[in-house]
Amino acid sequence: MKIREATAEDWPAIWPFFHKIVADGETFPYPLGTDEDEGRDLWMVAAPGRTVVAVDSIGTVMGTANMYRNRMGNGSHVASASYMVDPAYTGRGVGRALCSYSLDWARAAGFRAMQFNAVVETNEHAMALYRSLGFEVLGTVPEGFLHPTKGYVGLHILHRRV
């Protein structure tokens, strides 16, 4: 697996799984009806942020991440990131590789920490991954997310030093 900067040419490979994940409504607080142009604008972040893709040996996009400052001004020393793995590649370490990559990026860019603002508490795979990489739950917004089958569930705020 190789992780590299995402280009505009990668978007057609990202969009199908981005669309499925968002439309499923289980893990991302994006509008369920996000169209392709809106999705591209949400995901493909501009510098100084970064969007990357994880590709296999023949260049197939297996997952993607974006990383950026969590806040501006006096909060700009804390990074944040989001990850999406094509469901066809779940369980192959793509999410772990992307998360580790973003932590390395944050460290190299001079950030002091990484914070996730909205991890759906029922997203057990993501929570297990983040905990294994040293993230701690700082708090939970009760009923902060409307899950399509489980109703109102919490949104965790996670943090770790980089």
Image (cartoon, rainbow, N blue to C red):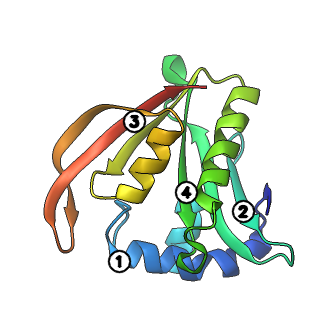
Q: Hey, which quadrant is residue 21 in on the image?
A: bottom left
Q: Hey, which quadrant is residue 88 in on the image?
A: bottom right
- Image coords of residue 111 (percent x, y): 64, 24
As drawn, the label of residue 83 is: 4
* Cα distance in 3D space between marks 1 and 3: 23 Å
- Image coords of residue 143 (percent x, y): 14, 51
Q: Amino acid at mark 3?
A: Leu
Q: Tell which of 70 and 38 is nearer to you.
A: 70
Residue located 57% across and 74% down the image: 86
Q: Which residue is mark 2?
A: 53
Q: Residue furthest top?
A: 74
Residue located 50% across and 27% down the image: 160
As drawn, the label of residue 24 is: 1
Residue located 76% across and 28% down the image: 108
As drawn, the label of residue 158 is: 3
Q: Residue furthest right?
A: 58
Q: Amino acid at mark 4?
A: Tyr
